[in-house]
Every structure is written in structure tokens, then in C-alpha cells.
Amino acid sequence: MTLNRNHFIAAPQREALVSLTALCYIEEHQLLTRQQLEDAKKSLQALFLRTSGEETTLRQLIEVLKSTRNIHRSFTSIAGIITGVTRCVTTVGERIAALREQINAQAPDDGKVSFNDLILKAAALALREFPNLNASLEGEQLVDHPNIDVNVAVAIEGGLIAPFVPDADQKGLIAIARMTKDLVGRARNGGLTPDEYQGGTFTISNLGMFDVEEFIAIINPPQAAILAVGSIKDVPVVEDGEITPGKRMNLTLSADHRVTDGAEVARFLQAVKRYLEKPLTIAFG
């Protein structure tokens, strides 16, 4: 694999590279166990291999990242952010799957709800309870935002872009589904206006469609946090002492510890998990 400043990196590869950069920072500061780091590195290197068809090493990936102008800002920003990472495993069970089926059975084609729409709404409702994670650090000033505008990371040719759903906590699921489909579609076609992606208060990045079970996303400055969503897997689940089929996914939150701390981040993830496991609270939230 020849590396140079003009090396083209496909969008899924760039997402892996940004996450690998975060892993290097986290490894240096001993924020995860060695096994967790190795597992995450293997998943992300597998993603890069699947999308590029070339065998490569972690060191080579980081060299590519350093020389890629489109994501240089993310690489350099991480050094100035005191980042903590917290992981949560949540069960995506029959109730939320049933709710999604019920909504989609009656929703128009442009309003079909995805699991990502459900996660977005759950995160938005949880941000009501944890406004620190909806804040931003602009220079030395902490700015609180009365609105909850959730960005959705979208891989496009030439980079990543993150349009946002304004007032996401106040919107219904079908409205969110319609808006995200529209934003994602226009993002990929180059049809977004600056006011649709220059802003937002919290970001969600989902690599589940690339079969990545767990990854660490880099915070989108000046925001305080970003939620990384892994793929949904069929697993055996113990309920009331019995083993039953279930679905699970990993949620990982990267947060600026100048704004929050690990305990608050853990409580926020528990709130997101609570909404996902009691889906009627999402439908009527």
C-alpha cells in the first residue's frame, strides 16, 4: 500500500481512521483496557480492509489519516480535548421491534422509521435530563443550549458531513424519519445548505451498516459529546431466568471531560438504554 498526501480514502475508511486516531489517544492515556483496545482495533482494521481490499497496519492507517486534509481538523483537535469514553450494551428487544413494525405498518413510505431514528429520539430525550452533554465549549466559555439539535454523521464522497435534526426531542418519530431521510439523501447528493450542517448540539455516528459492533467516535468540536452506535446482533438473552432470543447493540459515548465526567456520562447512557428498552416512552416523549 503506497501512502501519499493524495491517497484517496473512501468514506467508510475515513470513519475507521478517525476512530483509530481516537484509539491511539485513548491508548496513550490508558482510558480502556488492553483487550478492549485490541478488539476495537481489529474491528476497525477489518472495516478498512473490506472497503479498500488492501492489507494495512494501524501505523499506516494513522499516517494516511495525518496526510488527509478533509479530516485533519478532527485529528488535531483530539489533542486539545480531555476525552473520556464510556460503553453501554443495550438490549433491542421484541417491544421496540414491535413498536417499529406498528409504526411502519401505518407510516407512508417517506416516514418509515429506522432503528437509528429510534436511537436519535432516545438520545434527544435523554439530553433533556443531562443538559451538560448538550452544551458546547467555545474557547474557554461553556455555552448551554436551550434547544436539542442532533447531528447525524453521513459518509459522502470526499469526507463526512453531519446535518442536524433541530429540536429533535420535540419531534415525533415519523417526523424524525422523514427529516433524516431527506437530510441524508441531500447530503449524499450535495444538496444541503450550510445552515443544515453548520450547527447542532450533539452528534450520533452509526457504523452498524458496516457490521462494526463497537467503535469510538471523535467529538465534533465545539460539542461536548458524540454517541457511537454499533451493529445490532442476534444474541441469547436471559429474561426471568430463561434464555430467549434477543438483539443487542453497543453504544459508546465520547465526552469532553472539561464539561462532564464519567459518572454523568454513564447515567446518560443508562437513560438512553431505558428509553430504548421501554419504547412507548419514545413514542410519546
Image (cartoon, rainbow, N blue to C red):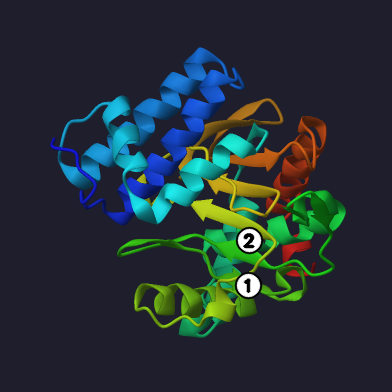
The vertical placement of 228 against 163, above or below, is above
- Which of the two residues, 112 or 99, is positioned nearer the viewer here? 112
Q: Quadrant of residue 249?
A: top right
Q: Position of residue 153 (x, y in %)?
A: 50, 60
Q: Quadrant of the N terminus?
A: top left
Q: In the rendered image, which residue does mark 2 sit on? A: 120
272 to the left or right of 66: right
- Which of the two residues, 155 or 211, is positioned nearer the viewer here? 155
- Furthest toward the top, the residue is 34
Q: Are marks 2 and 1 in contact (CB under 8 Å)?
A: yes
Q: Is residue 90 visible?
A: no
Residue positioned 62% across, 38% down in the render: 80
The vertical placement of 32 against 234, above or below, is above
64 to the left or right of 272: left
Residue positioned 62% across, 22% down in the render: 31
- Element at label 2: helix
Q: Which mark is residue 165?
A: 1
- Which of the two residues, 46 or 76, is positioned nearer the viewer here? 76
Q: Which mark is residue 229?
A: none
